[in-house]
Amino acid sequence: MVTVHVEPSGIDVEVAEGKSVMAEAERQGLFWPTICHGLAECHTCFFEVIEGEENLEPPNALETTALKDFSGRSWYEGKVIRLACQSRVRGNVTVRKPGVRPVS
């Protein structure tokens, strides 16, 4: 298990090898903003990588296609953006994703 630390909430998500960040967050009773629930179609689950980019697996084909929609937009320029529904981790990572919270 590795840890994905989510800011600004300060929540830690324990992620098992081979599992997506969003799926593991949901399994642990957390709400992660999404509309398509893991299909890489809505892009709502995106997060900004703050630290540990090298600990993320390279984007798969679905994520690579989806991430093209972020290119050329000034807010994302110079930032590492990934989709939580597709991202797999192999070491600790810190990300920024507003809206992640315990399900109430």
Image (cartoon, grey):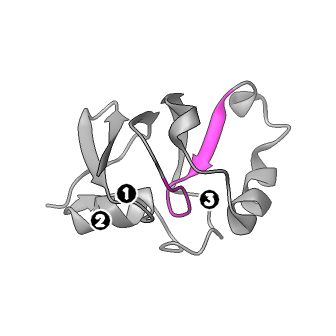
Q: Alpha carbon of mark 1 to alpha carbon of mark 2: how far?
A: 7 Å
Q: Which dot, 1 or 2, sits closer to the camera?
A: 2
Lateral position of residue 27 relative to residue 72, left or right = left
Is 70 located above or below residue 41 in the figure? Answer: above
Prevailing secondary structure class for the magenta stretch in the rendered image: loop
Q: Quadrant of the C terminus?
A: bottom left
Which residue: 60% across, 47% down? 82
- The residue stretch that appears in magenta: 79-88
x, y (%) of residue 93? Answer: 42, 36
Q: Which residue is mark 1?
A: 32
Lateral position of residue 55 relative to residue 69, left or right = left
Q: Alpha carbon of mark 1 to alpha carbon of mark 3: how far?
A: 12 Å
Identified by mark 3, the residue type is His
Identified by mark 2, the residue type is Glu
Q: Which residue is mark 3?
A: 43
Q: Which residue is mark 2?
A: 26
